[in-house]
Image (cartoon, rainbow, N blue to C red):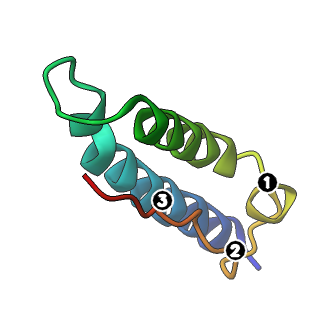
Amino acid sequence: MNNFDEWTIICFKRAERDQLLQQSDKYLLSDYPISSSNLELIKQYRQDLRNYMNIPEIVNYNSNVILPPMPQFSF
C-alpha cells in the first residue's frame, strides 16, 4: 500500500468518526432532555469514538475496522 492509500484511509475514518461525534453533540447540551443514565451512555460512546483513531488496526491502515455503534436508549 502506498502512502496516498494509507492517508486516504485515515482521513476517511477520521471524517466518519467526526461526523458521528457531531451528530451526538446535541445530547450534551445542558437543556437537552436526557436521563443521567443515557447521558453516561452517550459520554462513553463519544469516548469510544475518540479512542477509535488509536486502535492498532486503524493506525496500521486497515479499512475494515467498524466504528462503535450509537447506544440505543429511549426517552
Pick the residue in front: 34 or 69.
Answer: 34
64 left or right, relative to 55: left
Quadrant of the image containing the N terminus: bottom right
Label whose residue precedes the other's in the sequence (2 or 3): 2
Mark 2 lies on residue: 65
Mark 1 lies on residue: 55
Quick one: label 3, few (<14), some, or many (20+) residues within 10 Å?
few
The extreme left residue here reads 31
Q: In the image, what residue type sits under mark 2?
A: Val
37 left or right, relative to 55: left
Question: From mark 1 to mark 2, how far is it between C-alphas?
Answer: 9 Å
Residue at 59% x, 59% y: name it. Answer: 10
Q: Which mark is residue 71?
A: 3
Pick the residue in front: 4 or 51.
Answer: 51
Label whose residue precedes the other's in the sequence (3 or 1): 1
Residue at 42% x, 34% y: name it. Answer: 39
Task: Tell me, yes or no, whether the two marked residues, 3 and 1, touch with CB atoms within 8 Å.
Answer: no
Task: Tell me, yes or no, whether the two marked residues, 1 and 2, touch with CB atoms within 8 Å.
Answer: yes
Residue 63 in the image: above or below residue 57: below
2 left or right, relative to 29: right
Horizontal and vertical percent position of residue 6 = 67, 67
Q: In the image, what residue type sits under mark 3?
A: Pro
Residue at 51% x, 34% y: name it. Answer: 40
Residue 24 in the image: above or below residue 73: above
Horizontal and vertical percent position of residue 59 = 78, 55
